[in-house]
Amino acid sequence: MQNLSPNAEVALAVVLYSLCSGSLVLVNKLILWHLPFPSLVITFQLWATLLFIFSAKIVGLLEVDPLKWEFVVPYLIYCIAFSMGVFCNMKSLSISNVETVIVFRAMAPIAVSFLDAIFLGRHFPSFRSWVALTLIVLGAMGYANSDESFQSQGI
């Protein structure tokens, strides 16, 4: 990637991230079809991740810092929130179709932009970003109105 221009590198990163994210959703949906226990699937995936990291450390492929409680404790809240988000995503996959989950995941930046401004003191999105966020919302509304299998559950 050293020969790519910065714009091409960003575009490649976005495409590769999208492919990874989309394929992960599809694989998780397939797994949940055969094993309809979201919390069990997540537990296996998180343990597999830990096993991969520590195996790579043992064979010298990764440099992993030792766990220190002074650093672990502050990140516990983040880890719990991350795990809850993953569980909600898996639960959503188990009760709805993949397209619906992808649309609602695409809307996450809207919430993040408000929460960043409110809790972290960052700036609210620029006009250009608001246009992009509005297009995301309009696309989600268009999808929800046109998909015959979309069902709103809740209020």
Image (tube, grey):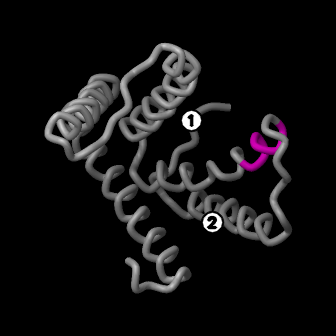
Q: Who's the residue at 76% across and 43% down the image?
A: 116
Q: Is residue 98 above or below residue 50?
A: below
Q: Nearer the viewer, residue 132 or 3?
A: 3
Q: Is residue 36 magenta?
A: no
Q: Position of residue 11 (x, y in %)?
A: 49, 77
Q: Who's the residue at 29% across and 25% down the image?
A: 43
Query: Quadrant of the image for the C terminus?
Result: top right
Q: Residues within 10 Å of mark 2 (few under 14, many from 20)?
A: some
Q: Secondary structure at mark 1?
A: loop
Report the Cα–Cα distance between label 2 and label 1. Answer: 19 Å
How many numbered markers are drawn?
2
Observer able to see residue 9? yes
Question: CB atoms at circles 2 and 1 under 8 Å apart?
Answer: no
Q: Which residues are magenta?
A: 113-118
Q: Is residue 115 magenta?
A: yes
Amino acid beneath label 2: Gly
- Direction from residue 113 to residue 149 in the image, left or right: left
Residue lying at the far left in this picture: please name it: 59
- Direction from residue 61 to residue 68 in the image, left or right: right
Q: Nearer the viewer, residue 146 or 74?
A: 74
Q: Is residue 44 above or below residue 131?
A: above
Between discs 2 and 1, the one toward the N terminus: 2
Q: Who's the residue at 36% across and 64% down the image?
A: 19
Tell me, for residue 153, which label it has, or none: 1
Q: Position of residue 127 (x, y in %)?
A: 85, 69
Observer able to see residue 36? no
Amino acid beneath label 1: Gln
Q: Which residue is mark 2?
A: 139
Query: Quadrant of the image for the N terminus?
Result: bottom left
Quadrant hosting residue 37: top left
Q: Is residue 48 above or below residue 5?
A: above
